Amino acid sequence: MLADPHVWTTVLAGGIGSRFWPVSTPEHPKQLLPLASDRPLIVDTVERARALAPDERIRILAGRHLAEPFRNVLPDLADECYWVEPEAKGTCPVLAWAAWQVHQVDPEAVMVSLHADHLIRPVERFQETLETAVEVARRDDLLLSVGAEPDRPETGFGYVAPGELLEPAGSVSAHRVEAFHEKPAVETAQRYIDQGYLWNTGIFVWKAAVFLEEVATHAPEVDTHMAMLEDSVESFFDSVPVCVVDRAVMERSARVGTVRASFEWDDVGSWEALSRTREGDGHHNVLIGQARAVEARDNIVFSE
C-alpha cells in the first residue's frame, strides 16, 4: 500500500455495460463478468485498490441493486466499504458526494477514483504511477488525470493535451493539462497522437477539499445542491442533474494536471476490447468459457 495514510480509493461501479448485452444486464452487469482476467472485473479492481489503501479506506460507489451481487464475489469486504447511490446521476454528482463524505471523516484526504471496467497491468507500475499522482496532488493542489500513451487512434476514448512539465515528485512525469478533448473522429484522434496527446483513462487523483472547491467554482449545477447532503443524501441525488465530471469540472478548471501512466491500460468497454485484453489462439480467436473454433479466425466467443 502507499505510505500516505490519508489516501482513499473510490471505485465507480454503477454502470450497466450495455455494450456487452446480452451477457451484461442491469441485474448482472459487466463488473461481475470475467472480461479482463478469469475473475470478475470488480474483483480485479478491488485488488488494485488494495495496492493503494487498506479496506477501511476503500469505497465502492454503486446502486443498491448491485451491492449484494458485489458482496457475493467480495465476501471479505466490509459493509461500510459500500456507498450506495440512491439514483444514478453520472460521475460528477457521485464523486462530489464521495468527496464530501471523505472530507467529513478525513480533512487531509487524497482521493483516487478508479473505474470497475479497466484492464491494468502490472499492478506494481500502477502503484508506482499512483504514488506519484498522490504526491503531486498533495503538493500542487491539482486535479490529476492519469494519462495513458496511445497505441492506436481510438475514437472511444477522451484525450488529454499535456502542457508544462511539473516538478518531479516520483518516478513518472507529471504535466499541467492544456486541454481535454472528448471522443474524436479517427482522423482527429490520429492528429492528437501525432501531437503527443495522452488517453484520458478516467483515473483521477485529487485532494477531497480541492475537488470540492473546484465543484463550487465551476460546477454550479452540482454545487447548488451540495448543502442538501447535510440532511439527506436522497434529496441531493433526487434534485441534482445528470452530469459527468470530465465536462462539469475537469474541462472548466484551471487547476488540472496529468500523470503519465507507466502501466498498460485499456478500457473494457465493448466486445471488441476482448481481442486486446485476452490472449487469442494462433488464428486470433479469443475463446472464453466452453468454446471451440473450427476453421475460424478473428472471432470473439463468450460462453457461459
Image (tube, rainbow, N blue to C red):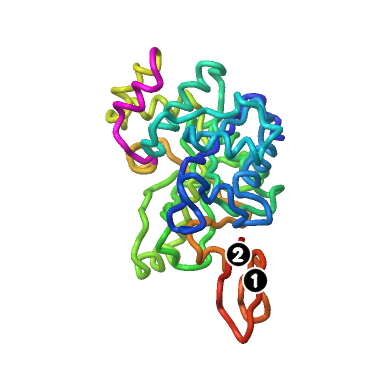
Q: Which residue is mark 2?
A: 303
Image mark for residue 270: none
Residue 147 within the segment the image draws in magenta: no
Judge from the rendering whether residue 80 lies leftward or rightward of residue 202; answer left or right. right
Crowding at mark 2 (Cα within 10 Å: few <14, some 14-19, many 20+) = few
Q: Amino acid at mark 2?
A: Ser
Residue 158 in the image: state x and y as whole percent: 41, 54
Q: Please tell me which residue lies in front, 150 or 272.
A: 272
The stretch in magenta equals 231-245
Q: Is residue 108 above or below residue 185?
A: above
Residue 194 in the image: state x and y as whole percent: 44, 67
Pointer 1 with pointer 2, Cβ within 8 A: yes
Q: Earlier in the sequence, mark 1 or mark 2?
A: 1
Q: Please tell me which residue is depicted at 66% across the width and 54% down the height of the picture.
A: 121
Position of the C terminus by quadrant: bottom right
Q: Please tell me which residue lies in front, 159 or 241.
A: 241
Residue 172 in the image: state x and y as whole percent: 62, 48
Q: Which residue is mark 1?
A: 291
